[in-house]
Amino acid sequence: MSAARARRGRTKRDGLGAWVDEVAVLHAKASRALRVEVVHDLRVAIRRCRSLAQGLRQVDADDGAARWKALSDAGRALFQGLGDLRDAQVMKEHASRALANAPCAAAVDAAIEARIAAVKVSARAAVAGFDVDAWRAAADGLPERAHALLVERALFDHLALRRFHEVKELHQQAMRSKASTSLHELRIGVKKLRYTLENFLPDAHAAVGKVLKRAQDLLGDVHDLDVLVATLSSEHVRLHSDDRSRTATVVRADRDRLVQEYRALALGNDG
């Protein structure tokens, strides 16, 4: 087992303190090179800390809520600053699969590579602007506070129920419209529910966590393909109009298939 994989395994068991440390370790790696796996893992680590903070903020006293907000805020700029780069890196992966045999694949790949190079400038600025000492200071004492709060099961039952009803409403809206915005909002809702269960209600997560993760992944892929379609329509991709139309049709067909796969999963008909 690699050291990185072993560390990721420990963080899942050890909670907030280990995720805070993971952010610092991965930030140092990102300072050296913005590799695909580093950008992904760093955003995941920050998201873990922020999701814990956002959940605990809702059940803590006022002074504690302010501290949880401060931790969430401390990671926001870096998380958002890496977002465009991560989106472009994922878009490249989707384009490589969806357009593997298309004559226009090279032109699309070149456009995405140009996009990656452009957004790396702001990503590097976000990495350079992240203060690791301030991050650790914001987290000081919070792992212990989290441990004390996590015994209050009823509070998290209520929070999870609220998240569930939010997802149910978002699902109904998304299935009516199939619009990219509503499906993206649904993905965010599913993610919040999954993290609430994973962070605070492990027994419930053991029962439904895999389904929620699959739903989140499907909706994430739908969003990525929507972004790819928009990119194919932009002036940055130099394609003949016929090639542009054919390529967008291929990507939309893949996108619609994933929406139907998500719907079957949500209805329990995924086999």
Image (spheres, rainbow, N blue to C red):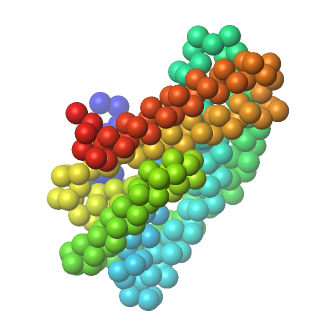
Report x, y in % for residue 125.
Answer: 73, 50
Q: Quadrant of the C terminus?
A: top left
Q: Residue at x 62, y 55 (%)?
A: 80
What is the total number of numbered labels drawn onto the structure image? 0
In the image, 41 versus 167, the foreground residue is: 167
Q: Is residue 27 visible?
A: no
Report x, y in % for residue 148.
Answer: 26, 77
In the image, 45 versus 190, the foreground residue is: 190
Q: Residue at x 23, y 51 (%)?
A: 208
Report x, y in % for residue 98.
Answer: 55, 22
Q: Quadrant of the N terminus?
A: top left
Residue found at the very far bottom of the displayed protein? 62
Q: Is residue 262 left or right of residue 136?
A: left
Q: Is residue 1 left or right of residue 181?
A: left
In the image, 139 versus 104, the foreground residue is: 104
Up-down: is 155 above or below 26?
Answer: below
Q: Quadrant of residue 259?
A: top left
Q: Is residue 149 visible?
A: yes
In the image, 212 versus 180, the foreground residue is: 180
Q: Residue at x 61, y 48 (%)?
A: 83
Q: Is residue 44 left or right of residue 193?
A: right
Up-down: is 124 above or below 153?
Answer: above
Q: Residue at x 30, y 42 (%)?
A: 265
Report x, y in % for residue 84.
Answer: 66, 45
Q: Quadrant of residue 163?
A: bottom left
